[in-house]
Amino acid sequence: MVDLLTDKVVVLSGVGPGLGRALGEEAARMGADLVLVSRTEKRLEKMAEVVRSHGRRALVVPTDITDEDQRKALVDKALEEFGRVDCLINNAFAIPPMDPVGTLGLDGLRAAQETNVFAPLRLSSLFADALAETPEKPGGSIIMLNSCVVYSSQPEYSGYKLSKGTLAHLASSLATELGPRGIRVNSVAPSYIYEDVNKAYFDWLASESGRTHEEVYAEKAAPTDLKRLATPDEVAKAALFLASDLASAVTGVMLNVDCGEFHDN
């Protein structure tokens, strides 16, 4: 693995299975130290073991990122431990109600937006001073984990699209606002990621339709140019490129990691 993030400090919000784990492990392989953030301490400790197995430091900070006091405490603990922060990855996600938007109750939408939009906004704002003070050029960065759902108009994905569409606009606005301070803000948009949750989903679809798992996979991969689905580590590597010095002049973009399913025209 190329040491793209040697000695950088990465705050990873949303440590979990699949992409969250891949982001943490790939960042450690690239030479970063990690501040690991989610509500579940046991999950964080397992991720910390993985980070340390690659010779990097890990700070475990159980946090409810929808709570302002806990968000502020997270910033304090990160800086107390490492003295710097080079990258914030906003990966945490709450599943919105999966029904047509005209039928959705506002309480469910508000709850999802707290995690999916307002928490990334506040974490980005609270870490901005530290990111602006990153010792080495080109400066600090923020990465928003978005989704190719923003290109979909399926009724059942409307609440999901509302969250991710708002997050895309937030990232664009923050890129403009924080750019003069040397902070880059970018987004990554995967389509289906071939990981455990989607593998189980494909199994369910197969059982419901009398098909095999492989046939369901082929159906989901058919719209892509590469005729396959991205793996968690592939999405993580693309995201972490945006945290590296190789992307020093890249800000305000959303990078699709979808094996060529969606194209900008």
Image: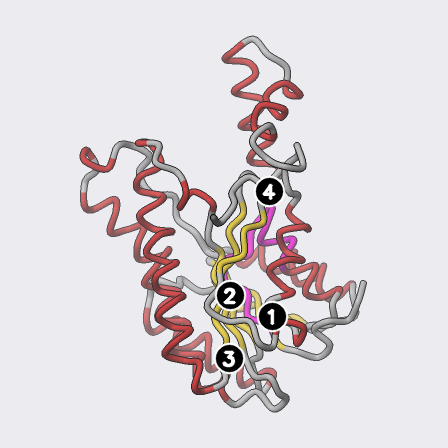
Earlier-in-chain disc, 2 versus 3: 3
The one of 246 and 13 positioned closer to us in this rendering:
246
Q: Please say if 166 is above or below 265.
A: below
**Amino acid type of the residue tagged 1 in the rendering:** Ala
The residue at which mark 1 appears reads as: 243
In magenta, the rendered stretch is 10-23
The residue at which mark 2 appears reads as: 143
Choose top left, top right, bottom left or bottom right for residue 26. Answer: bottom right
Q: Residue 219 in magenta?
A: no
Label 1's element?
loop
Mark 2 Cα shell of 10 Å, populated few (<14), some (14-19), many (≥20): many
Mark 4 Cα shell of 10 Å, populated few (<14), some (14-19), many (≥20): some
Q: Are marks 2 and 1 in contact (CB under 8 Å)?
A: yes
Mark 3 Cα shell of 10 Å, populated few (<14), some (14-19), many (≥20): some
**Amino acid type of the residue tagged 2 in the rendering:** Ile
Residue 95 position within the rendered picture, expressed as x and y whole percent measured from the top left: 38, 43
CA gap between label 3 and label 4 equals: 40 Å
Q: Residue 12 in magenta?
A: yes
Choose top left, top right, bottom left or bottom right for residue 176. Answer: bottom left
Q: Are marks 2 and 4 in contact (CB under 8 Å)?
A: no
Numbered label attached to residue 77: 3
CA gap between label 2 and label 3 equals: 20 Å
Label 3's element?
helix
Residue at image point 50% right, 82% down: 131
Label 2's element?
strand
CA gap between label 2 and label 4 equals: 21 Å
